[in-house]
Amino acid sequence: MIQDISPHKLHNEFRPGEMPQADSIVILFRKELLLADVRDNELFLPLWKDFPTISRYVYLFTLDETDVFLCLDEEQTAPEGYDFYPLRDLRRKAGGPQERMFAAYTAVHLYHWYSANRFCGSCGNRTVPAPDERAMDCPACGKRIYPRIQPAVIVGVTNGDSLLITRYADRPLAIPALVAGFAEIGETLEETVAREVMEETGLQIRNLRYYKSQPWGIADDLLAGFYCDVDGDPTVRLDRHELKEAVWIPRGQIEGQPDDFSLTNEMMMTFKAGREPRGCALPE
């Protein structure tokens, strides 16, 4: 998966007062487009020395020994050779290196948060970075705002030796997927699984078991992967607002996604290989 970058390491602890160096990586988004370069299927991110000057920035994290900073001035001129790309395009165009892709996917989560919290939601005054931790402070009312992580589930629904493979209704490139959705307020992840499967496919489930989790910064998510068995009638009743397709695919016919970045793809390939968890069911 995209976060599996060993022996590389993303150090996400916040370091107040960190100053950029010439070889620090600069993350610059313009709306949802990331400044980058792709050469020979390899992703390159600009460095601090590539810019004449950056006056507004914030430290994000460190990738191995290289500090990564978010440029807060979206009108910066792109250095020669760089352009702005949607992250999904970079995922298709650049096969790696995986540690840079993971850095970009983590950075977009923080970019969303900083962009959405420039003003206080309680009193409307402009916020400032907290001096001691990753947070935004309102000098007027004292509110402290922390990064938000949205919990969501990925669900491998099984029927014997078949897996329910879906395709989203609103995606221009409808790659194979699994049932997925965000947890609601006051809902456990186990309840989210049952609700999302029912809402999207009309199926009842049983034998719920946890698999793995994954940070997925492009949607500000922390994903939790579960397998479960269909309970009773396996006839799919599709919610066409969410999905364009949901079909039972035998193990040997599962194709997976074009890359191995996602928890969804790993769960499909794990089922195809017959290695999905079968015991230790969670309480229903």
Image (cartoon, grey):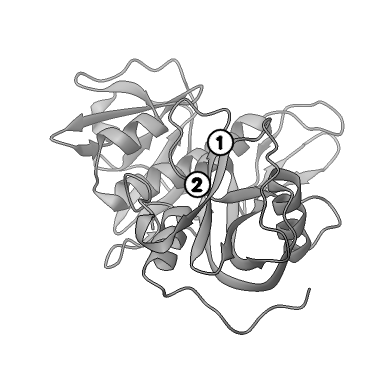
Q: Earlier in the sequence, mark 2 or mark 1?
A: 1
Q: Secondary structure at mark 2?
A: loop
Q: Are marks 2 and 1 in contact (CB under 8 Å)?
A: yes
What residue is pinned by disc 1? 168
Q: Residue 266 is drawn in which quadrant?
A: bottom left
- The disc label shown at residue 177, or none: 2
Q: How far from the left and from the top, in percent, is residue 229?
A: 64, 68
User: Is 284 situated above or below 239?
Assistant: below
Q: Is 142 on the left or on the right of 83, as rendered?
A: right
128 or 271, nearer to the observer: 271
Which residue is rendered at x = 32% and y = 61% of the image?
5
Where does the image place residue 35, in percent across and percent down from the top left?
A: 35, 26
CA separation, marks 2 and 1? 8 Å
Task: Work out which quarter of the rendered image holds the C terminus and state it.
Answer: bottom right
Most foreground residue, 90 or 6:
90
- The spot of residue 4 in percent (x, y) is 36, 62
